[in-house]
Image (cartoon, coloured by chain):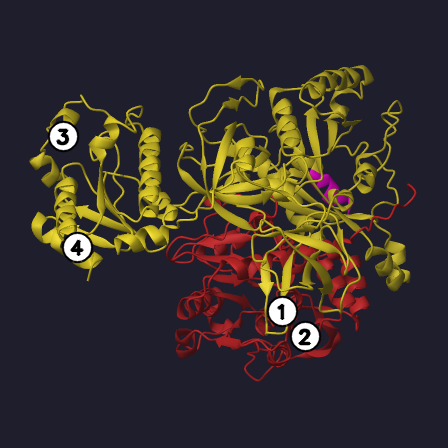
Chain colours: A red, B yellow
């Protein structure tokens, strides 16, 4: 192109990083009691890393909150505890006592499982601690209705999202003023794509759950999804036998609800390679999106799912 | 469909053969944000769908869903309806119209792109302005069959207003006019004439078809007469604002002061323009204090320089005051500081702007109280004519003066979007009700300096042996405000206190005799009374006021004028029935008969205080008891 002058061209990852850091600092400056929702997935890993950069040399001035379902992969609990130690942040783990008491689980209760543990659990945890702002790792490229959600997303006192009355967001100016009872969900990595996340993890050496890499794992095939048998609570259908397959996960949640893909990608670069060459979208491995057809996620969000 | 795919999209071979080489290349992509604007049927969603499709951002499962949806609700017969890929929310899918701003992502070999998909609908100026505020470039879509429409003019005006430097005029649906060069040329000529008239010096026209794929990723064989570049190539090479901003002077709006321990004090923020290095002499505005940059701190080690767009943490050589809202600049190139401006305002709320009312404005990292004066004029976005206006309604654009409650560092929007662009926040609902762009500061605020007085307010108050205060009575007409206020003043005088009672009726005979009873006049009435009361507290007096003062936001405005703790709001709480039954001055009767307009409680609202310092329920206390209670609270 033209003769290069002295100007420096920031890369897209540098731009995204700067934007996310700006958003996190705004929240800390303008809200009273922020918290970071930490789901132990790769998006959470990036978000936590960005928070450490934003406030360095201070540790991020808010706790991590894990809304637990008791059904996550073992490897996720291990990484969660390790990252809390390394970041010097307080880790709060919340399990909905009602779901616990009724033994709500993905085998017997279908959509109710997500609703009770995650949606209700999250509301209860936010109310219990009185957090007025919660960082979440949702990205706009994940799903159509998320493409329209703001970075600062307001929830009514009963945690509902109203897509019709969102505040306009201009320039990099975020209005964090809220009415009594309202809380804010803030999505600092809104503008990152799945590939951006992987590239950043690669460049910055961010620790992630080993389940993202291929390994021989015991799986059963159900409705076209490969489900991993992660512990003895797994319920087999008649005639079902786990088989060892080289698989990895593109998204992580409750293990009976997370579909694996067959893969031989053992390193980050191999995962990126596979992601670039792949032909199915990321959320496809999630059982919960399939509940109610096209507008499923939008409906969930109005009800208070993150 | 055009078949010639060029290298700009995807290099499958390299990904498969040498992923490390591929990644290395892709780590150095830059990021362009742009918006697409067009009328409802100009093919905007189809174009974006096409860009996503060509960049392989559509996966097989999405494609299968898209094909199924296309057959079900699509408008393209049996073909793929790309528009369905981008129209998100359920409600608008049924309407077939994009009703909000949505952000889409795709990447080519050179750049990552964020597209703001903005509506072409008449009433959605606010969404387009929102989407445009972060864009480096605007793609203005025209249906080649229809030519330049009112909407085209509106979108172009808004893109220019918001300061977008690069405008692409995409004459779409060329396939439907047989790739007719003459028609294309006449559309471009018509647009050129219009663009020059509104100050768009340069734009880039191109003949395209989002549906058929002409001149999107490669030169179309259907338009051999077109000698420009295809759309994607243009998007890949245009200069980014963030890069251009490096040539401007250094500006860092301070977001947050990082103070983990006594040995470290860092100033965090995102650089809005310029470059900074350790050793640079800096100045902090508005204080004007100077120091030197010692370090640029980061988790990955200290940086030797940082540029526009980066979020950084700076340390200084000296312990100077610097906090959120301040702006760090080079010592020899500071920004201006002022408290009165002319601004262009875009109104974004259903409730119209109230001239004179105090709103929050957020500019950079500072949030200040500001009042917006009556608009000088409003701009008709369709005809671009100026029209007189008393207020600004939803989606209206106007020019007005604004006054902030304290001087703020700023730059004209033309020079700096970061230090000249602001949002307007309603103090009661906390909603973002508008956006604005500062044009310039009014000269008087730069030249009138606050006179520092030798005899301070403390001296005045000390001489009178009292603490100044404003006892602000509020309540319905006939609630008993004046009666109780009079009793309070008598009791205070008996206690040797120096007082002054400002009565609503009396003030309207003199100071405020030019004001009527419209909402705007009521606000100005209260503002003036507030200023007078403030001067009197400076003189050491206990000021007693008795005004209906029906609006919460105006009472808050007066509260903000006073020193902390000196404003005491006293709510004289009477039911409308009681006040109307008493009707000392016969005003309710007149209002009910329609002889008095804008009468509080009848056809104008009264907003009771949420947490007044003193709450008097007239059903429970006599005026005498109420006065005693107030005096006791004031002088325990």
Circles 1 and 4: CB atoms closer than 8 Å = no
Q: What is the spatial separation of the Cα atoms under label 2 and label 1, in whole angstroms? A: 9 Å
Which residue lies under the disc numbered 1?
A252
Q: Which of A119 and B519 is in front in this view?
A: B519
Q: Quadrant of residue B206?
A: top right
Q: What is the spatial separation of the Cα atoms under label 3 and label 4, in whole angstroms? A: 31 Å
Which residue lies under the disc numbered 4?
B631
Characterize the local packing of mark 4: few (<14), some (14-19) or many (20 or more) Cα atoms within 10 angstroms: some
Q: Which structural element holds mark 4?
A: helix
Q: Which of marks 3 and 4 is nearer the N terminus?
A: 3
Q: Nearer the viewer, residue A55 or B515?
A: B515
Give yes or no for residue A135 being in the magenta stretch: no
The picture places residue B389, in percent across and down from the top left corner, at 45, 22
**Mark 3 or 1, closer to the camera:** 3
Which residue lies under the disc numbered 2?
A209
Q: Quadrant of residue B485?
A: top left
Which residue lies under the disc numbered 3?
B588
Q: Quadrant of residue A278?
A: bottom right
* Left or right: B134, with B204 as reference point: left
Q: Is residue B326 above or below residue A262?
A: above
* Left or right: A8, with B631 as reference point: right
Circles 2 and 1: CB atoms closer than 8 Å = yes
Circles 3 and 1: CB atoms closer than 8 Å = no
């Amino acid at each position: 192109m033209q003769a290069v002058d002295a100007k420096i061209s920031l890369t897209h990852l540098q731009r995204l990083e700067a934007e996310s850091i700006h958003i996190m600092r705004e929240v800390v400056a303008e809200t009273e009691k922020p918290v970071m929702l930490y789901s132990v997935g790769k998006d959470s890993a990036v978000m936590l890393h960005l928070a450490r950069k934003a406030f360095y040399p201070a540790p991020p001035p808010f706790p991590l909150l894990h809304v637990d379902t008791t059904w996550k992969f073992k490897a996720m609990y291990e990484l969660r505890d390790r990252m809390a130690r390394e970041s010097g942040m307080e880790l709060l783990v919340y399990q909905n006592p009602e779901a616990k008491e009724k033994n709500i689980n993905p085998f017997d209760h279908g959509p109710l499982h997500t609703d009770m543990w995650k949606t209700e659990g999250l509301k209860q945890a936010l109310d219990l601690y009185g957090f007025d702002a919660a960082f979440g790792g949702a990205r706009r490229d994940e799903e159509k209705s998320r493409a329209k959600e703001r970075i600062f997303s307001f929830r009514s006192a009963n945690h509902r999202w109203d897509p019709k009355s969102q505040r306009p967001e201009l320039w990099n100016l975020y209005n964090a003023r809220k009415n009594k009872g309202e809380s804010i969900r803030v999505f600092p990595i809104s503008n990152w794509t799945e590939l951006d996340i992987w590239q950043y993890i690669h460049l910055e050496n961010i620790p992630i759950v080993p389940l993202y890499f291929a390994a021989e794992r015991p799986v059963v095939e159900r409705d076209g999804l490969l489900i991993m048998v992660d512990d003895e609570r797994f319920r087999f259908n008649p005639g079902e036998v786990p088989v060892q397959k080289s698989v990895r996960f593109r998204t992580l949640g409750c293990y009976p609800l997370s579909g694996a893909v067959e893969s031989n990608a053992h390193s980050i670069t191999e995962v990126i390679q596979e992601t670039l060459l792949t032909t199915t979208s990321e959320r496809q491995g999630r059982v919960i999106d399939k509940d109610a057809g096209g507008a499923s996620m939008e409906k969930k969000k109005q009800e208070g799912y993150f | 469909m055009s078949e010639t795919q060029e290298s700009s999209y995807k290099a499958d071979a390299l990904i498969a053969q040498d992923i490390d080489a591929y990644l290395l290349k892709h780590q150095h992509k830059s990021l362009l944000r742009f918006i697409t604007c067009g009328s409802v049927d100009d093919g905007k969603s189809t174009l974006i769908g096409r860009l996503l499709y060509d960049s392989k951002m559509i996966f097989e499962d999405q494609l299968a869903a898209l094909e199924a949806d296309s057959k079900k609700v699509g408008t393209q017969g049996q073909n793929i309806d790309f528009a369905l890929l981008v129209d998100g929310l359920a409600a608008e899918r049924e309407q077939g119209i994009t009703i909000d701003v949505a952000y889409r992502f795709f990447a080519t070999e050179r750049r990552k792109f964020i597209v703001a998909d903005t509506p072409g609908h008449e009433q959605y100026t606010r969404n387009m302005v929102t989407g445009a505020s972060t864009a480096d470039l605007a793609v203005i879509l025209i249906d080649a069959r229809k030519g330049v429409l009112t909407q085209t003019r509106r979108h172009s005006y808004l893109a220019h207003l918001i300061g977008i430097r690069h405008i692409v005029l995409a004459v779409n649906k060329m396939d439907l006019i047989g790739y007719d060069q003459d028609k294309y040329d006449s559309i471009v000529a018509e647009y050129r004439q219009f663009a020059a008239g509104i100050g768009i010096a340069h734009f880039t026209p191109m003949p395209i078809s989002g549906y058929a794929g002409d001149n999107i990723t490669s030169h179309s064989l259907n338009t051999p007469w077109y000698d420009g570049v295809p759309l994607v190539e243009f998007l890949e090479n245009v200069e980014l604002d963030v890069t251009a901003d490096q040539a401007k002077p250094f500006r860092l709006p301070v977001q947050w002061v990082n103070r983990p321990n006594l040995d470290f004090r860092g100033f965090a923020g995102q650089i809005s323009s310029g470059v900074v290095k350790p050793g640079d002499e800096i100045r902090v505005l508005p204080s004007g204090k100077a120091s030197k940059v010692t370090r640029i701190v980061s988790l990955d080690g200290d940086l030797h320089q940082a540029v526009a767009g980066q979020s950084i943490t700076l340390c200084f050589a000296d312990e100077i005051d610097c906090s959120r809202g301040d702006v760090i600049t080079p010592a020899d190139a500071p920004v201006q500081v002022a408290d009165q401006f002319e601004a262009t305002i875009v109104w974004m709320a259903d409730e119209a702007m109230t001239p004179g009312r105090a709103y929050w404005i957020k500019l950079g990292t500072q949030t200040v109280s500001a009042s917006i004066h009556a608009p000088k004029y409003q701009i008709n976005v369709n005809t671009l004519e100026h029209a007189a206006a008393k207020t600004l309604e939803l989606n209206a654009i106007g020019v007005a003066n604004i006054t902030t409650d304290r001087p703020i560092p700023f730059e004209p929007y033309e020079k700096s979007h970061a230090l000249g662009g602001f949002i307007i926040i309603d103090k009661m609902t906390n909603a973002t009700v508008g956006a604005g762009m500062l044009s310039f500061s009014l000269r008087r605020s730069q030249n009138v300096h606050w006179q520092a007085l030798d005899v301070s307010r403390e001296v005045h108050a000390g001489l009178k042996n009292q603490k100044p205060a404003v006892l602000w009575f509020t309540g319905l007409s006939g609630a008993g405000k004046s009666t109780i206020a009079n009793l309070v003043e008598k009791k205070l005088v008996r206690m040797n206190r120096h007082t002054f009672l400002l009565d609503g009726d009396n003030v309207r005979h003199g100071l405020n005799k030019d004001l009527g009873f419209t909402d705007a006049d009521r606000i100005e009435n209260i503002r003036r009374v507030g200023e007078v009361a403030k001067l009197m507290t400076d003189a050491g007096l206990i000021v007693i006021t008795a005004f209906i003062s029906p609006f919460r936001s105006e009472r808050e405005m007066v509260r903000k004028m006073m020193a902390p703790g000196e404003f005491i709001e006293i709510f004289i709480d009477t039911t409308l029935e009681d006040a109307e039954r008493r009707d000392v001055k016969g005003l309710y009767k007149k209002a009910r008969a329609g002889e008095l307009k804008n009468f509080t409680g009848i056809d104008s609202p009264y907003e009771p205080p949420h947490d007044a310092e003193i709450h008097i329920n007239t059903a429970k206390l006599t005026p005498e008891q109420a006065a005693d209670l107030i005096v006791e609270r004031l002088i325990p």
